[in-house]
Amino acid sequence: MKKCFMLIVATAAFVACNSNQKAAPEEVAAESAVAVKTAVAEKMTIDLKETYTSEILPYKENDITPAAQGLHIDQIKFDVGDRVKEGQVVATLNRTSLKQLEINLATVEDSYNRMKPVHEAGGISDQQFTELENTLSLQKEIVEQMRKNSEIKSPISGVVTARNYENGDLFSGMPILHVMQINKLKVMANVSEQYYPNVKVGQPVEIHVDIYPGEVFEGKVSRINPSLDAATRTFGVEVTIPNTNERLRPGMYARATFNMGQREAIMIDDIAVQKQSGSSERYVYVIKDGVANYRLVDDGRKIDGKVEIRKGIEAGEQIATTSFVRLMNGKAVEVVNE
């Protein structure tokens, strides 16, 4: 019985000793270290490119209307899709009213010519003759205005995009034709105020449209609004686009990319930046002395698989790029970049 008791005690002591050996701190730490890959945060020179969405607009457009209402349209010489030149007659109006006014003008002119020598001879007063001169001048202006209205000319060269009447219709206020100049186009971009010193007239701008994927159309800054919108803190920029082959058309959706210059920035692989669950915060793990350190960061623009870090890390620090699920602040790690 005594031998049996001694055997049990010896066995228990052996097991206890073996358990203590397995729980050695060095071995536990080695087993719990997380294998990670890292990348170095680098200071790089980056291009400040900003892209703004917009709609392509005609370079110029015009509603063609006569100055007076209530006149009948004799003839509209162009239809939708037709091209017109600046100064070309595009429509004529009924000339009945014009003829009546011309008869009235001839009567006033005849009266003026007859009364002029009478006035010179003292037959009528200066006041009467002045009134006659004023009547003649007013009648000439009315006739000249009606003559302009009888032939409607296009003030710009372009293509007709709308026709609102037919021959014989009574003009009632709506434009007879709408003309757009499309051999040049423009886009309007609302640029952030921080770039006001960077935008210059004549500056090249890249234009991209979805209908021509991968193709770049070259535009230039043609006008900069001198004031800012207080609500949005932006300023308007007009970009002119040559369109001699007319592949682009008004109404197309476009993206205008401005190169605002260069600056130094700290860049890391974009995969290293993680989003904090339940918030908009971003974080990374900085690896130092075999330990993961949790850091909140302020990220910026993304360029070719890298992301700018404006705040939170320094150039030269090692940043974890794998094993995020197993990492936590203070966790021991083993770097395995090879």
Image (cartoon, helix red, strand yellow):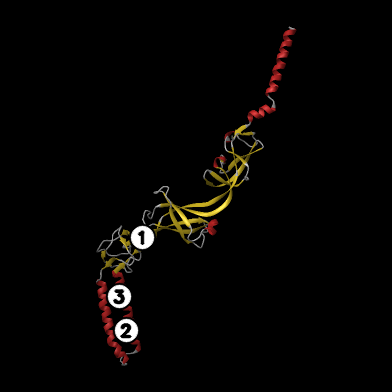
Q: Are marks 2 and 1 in contact (CB under 8 Å)?
A: no
How many neighbours does mark 2 have within 10 angstroms: few (below 14), some (14-19), or many (20 or more)? some
Identify the residue at the far right of this view.
Answer: 2
Q: Residue at x 57, y 34 (%)?
A: 325
Q: Residues within 10 Å of mark 3 (few under 14, many from 20)?
A: many
Q: Nearer the viewer, mark 2 or mark 3?
A: 3
- 209 above or below 35? below
Q: Nearer the viewer, residue 102 or 242?
A: 242
Residue visible at 33% across and 83% down in the picture: 133
Q: Is residue 23 left or right of residue 225?
A: right
Query: Disc 2 or 3, which lies upstream in sequence?
Result: 2
Q: Which residue is mark 1?
A: 180
Where disc 2 sits, the SS reads helix
SS type, badge 1: strand
Upstream in sequence: badge 3 or badge 1? 3
Could you give the CA–CA distance between mark 3 and mark 1, rounded to whole angstroms?
30 Å
The percent position of residue 71, horizontal first and vertical second, equals 28, 68
Mark 2 and mark 3: span between their CA atoms? 17 Å
Q: Nearer the viewer, residue 15 or 213?
A: 213
Q: Which residue is mark 3?
A: 143
Q: Which residue in the structure is indicated by mark 2?
A: 132
Q: CA distance from mark 2 to mark 1?
A: 45 Å
Q: Residue furthest top?
A: 1
Q: Is residue 191 above or below residue 32?
A: below
Across and down, in percent, residue 173 comes to: 33, 64
Amino acid type of the residue tagged 1 in the rendering: Met
Q: Is residue 275 visible?
A: no
The one nearer the camera, 174 or 39, is: 39
